[in-house]
Image: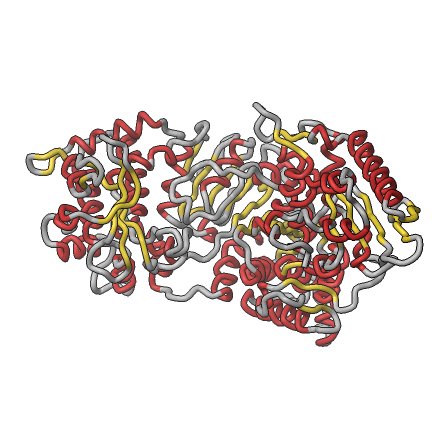
Amino acid sequence: MDPAPIAYIPGAEDEPPLPLARFLPPLPPGMVAGWLKERVEPGSVLIDPLNATPALALEAARAGYRVLVVSNNPVLTFMLEVLASAPRPAEFQAALAELGASRRGEERLELHLQSLYQTTCAACGGSAQASSYLWKRGESAPFARFYRCPHCHAEGEQPLEPGDLERLSPPGNPSLHRARALSRVAGPEEAHYGAVQEALEAYLDRPLYVLTTLINKQEGLALPPAQRRLLVALLISACDAASALWPHPGGGRSRPRQLSVPAQFHENNVWLALEGAISAWAGQPSAVPLVHWPEPPPEGGISLFSGRARALLPLPEGLRIGGLMALFPRPNQAFWSLTAVWSGWLWGRESSLPLHALLERRRFDWGWYANAMHQPLGALGKVLQPGTPVIGLLPEVTPGFLAAVLSAAEAAGLRLEGMALREDEEMAQGVWGISPPEPAPRPSEAAEAEPFENGLREALEQRAEPAPYLPLYAAGLACGGVSAAQPGAGPADVLARMQALAARGFANRRLVRRFDGGSQEDERSLWWLAEPPADLEEPLADRVEREVVRLLHRSPGILRIELETALCRTFTGALTPPRELVSAILESYAEEIAGQPGHWRLLPQEAPARRRADLDEARRLLKETGERMGYIVSGDTPLAWTPQSFGQVFFFYPMASSLVSRYVLGNPPAPVRQCVMVFPGSRARLLSFKLRRDPRLAELLKGWHLLKFRHLRSLSERQDLNPEVWDSLLDSDPPFFEEAEQMRLL
């Protein structure tokens, strides 16, 4: 059975804070619960085979499911344990106070560490804590500091002062501190020793000293186990904050994937980072019951298995699995390497054993990733019953990432049942089923390529507008690129075949063309049909506009998430409306209700009666103005001005929407310089947005006059109006703010 388009399940826009959020795959709240409600029987056992982020298991458990989590990363395992207990800020503050009150010689530890970041306010000369120092990669000293003065409240970036350089070197021998940090993770005889040395290059001397001091002091305190766990949680955040992988704006990736120090980076105040981490660790709304395997997951709770998926098997008899849900993480050498180091620092060398292979690996290509994801999917796929849904979420998706996951699932015996993708959120969602492979003869080369190319063609025909590479790539794979693999093929072989089919499909210039003026890189280009059929629907953007307005009419005060969900059920698969398009339509037609965040209603002027009156007025003004200038006025849409003897004919298209495609993509009755689109000014930004996303439409609209209702009223009121004045002033109120210097849309 061929995969079918499925409805994308949207989530909320704002993610709650999580520790280490910059390394974790993004997961919009509500997405997990929405998928489970759609596909998995309430209260049943769900397997999370990857634990890529604690957010998945926590949301599933709070939705009432029994979640069995397989976790092979000690840091992520610990995070899930702590977050499930939902500790409160006061508990963290008490634990941190114990640590701060410990002694380093004659001095309190907190005061000692704060002294390393002491600076002088440039405005008032008072003493302040630097929140961070700004460095350039490869230099021996920072060049700026950031602080907020507690005396005069001055804040921001300032050049260094001499005292800052004096405090740059930590007490003791920096080489000795570094050697001790290294020895906690690996010995010279171990294969991953060099990789740990490389990872430590991401730490400057001062923050590394602070970290090792904090960890050593924590170990020496006589604390209750629960309080020690909270301190360790904060220390994990400190381990992250102390690294040099914090780019200054414009200096590198905000979500690092490689152990590469940015060109400009922040050295954070580690003690302030400890204090600031409390909000992320204490941000859970409620506790979730958590036990450790082999104890089965409780109702609305989690059973946590530390290890690889294959070590979990065999599952106990009688444990019925209702579904499997995986959030696939992008390969991240920085996170995987750092968590191996942090594990050794916090829990000893043996704790980092599961991550040693990742420490030693230098390159994570998509073939490697397909094999890595195949292992848990293949192991668990063998024990799931036919009909068990397998749900996959792919955040930060790229073509290679998508193909690798599909290859892993295909080689594991999972059959893709449907897929949806939201391009501007970079999120793909897929559903697989457990079914035995169906032996089939190897198709010919031409027949093998046909399903992918059909998927490509169908996606463009359904969108009826140029499209980015990724949704088309996904549509091609969903339509036929996956099923082209032969039973028994390994994930790397399946991936190679998928990539070959995609390359062939996009290279077929009888099928598609790269849109002129775009990037020359396939994945950054817009694509369109080489020979579009004449009977295409109106463009996707126009259909989405119609549906948004219809939903706002039908449900005044509708929640944004409810509107998004309804749209995604109407436009499925690769047609999933981009969030930014929905936002542009809402900003044009609606307003968020004061005091009710997330609830939207039509603007008063968008009421059908008001807009009909506006259109009637526009037609009346066009008729009266044309007749006053001596034109013969006829028609409705278009409304024509025909000169009595000699002159230019004008054709006017009054509309209350931005659905210009129905006129622009057709055959205007005259050259476009004689055609005038008449519309409300509130549609200008929406129309501008549509033209940016659809260069084909922008190209066809060149030369049209774009006349806003307000400008029409202004012109109609002029006492000196005649054909010459009309021609000179018609384009004097540019419709697009960003093109105000242009008198015409060019």
Please identify the quarter of the rendering in which residue 592 is found: top right
Measuring 28% from the left and 51% from the top, which residue is drawn there?
A: 134
The foreground one among 202 and 703 is 703
Task: Give left or right: position of 581 versus 163.
Answer: right
The quarter of the image holding the C terminus is: bottom right
**Image location of residue 433, percent across then percent down:** 65, 51
Measuring 85% from the left and 40% from the top, which residue is drawn there?
A: 619
Q: Residue furthest left?
A: 106
The foreground one among 34 and 116 is 116
Picture colour scheme: secondary structure
Task: Give left or right: position of 173 versus 714.
Answer: left
Q: Is residue 506 above or below residue 538?
A: below
Task: Give left or right: position of 384 versus 51.
Answer: right
Residue 38 shows in the view = yes
Please identify the quarter of the rendering in which residue 513 is found: bottom right
Measuring 27% from the left and 36% from the top, which residue is drawn there?
A: 154
The quarter of the image holding the N terminus is: bottom right
**Image location of residue 389, percent across then percent down:** 63, 46
Measuring 69% from the left and 41% from the top, which residue is drawn there?
A: 681
The foreground one among 739 and 242 is 739
Q: Residue furthest top?
A: 595
**Image location of residue 673, percent across then percent down:** 78, 58
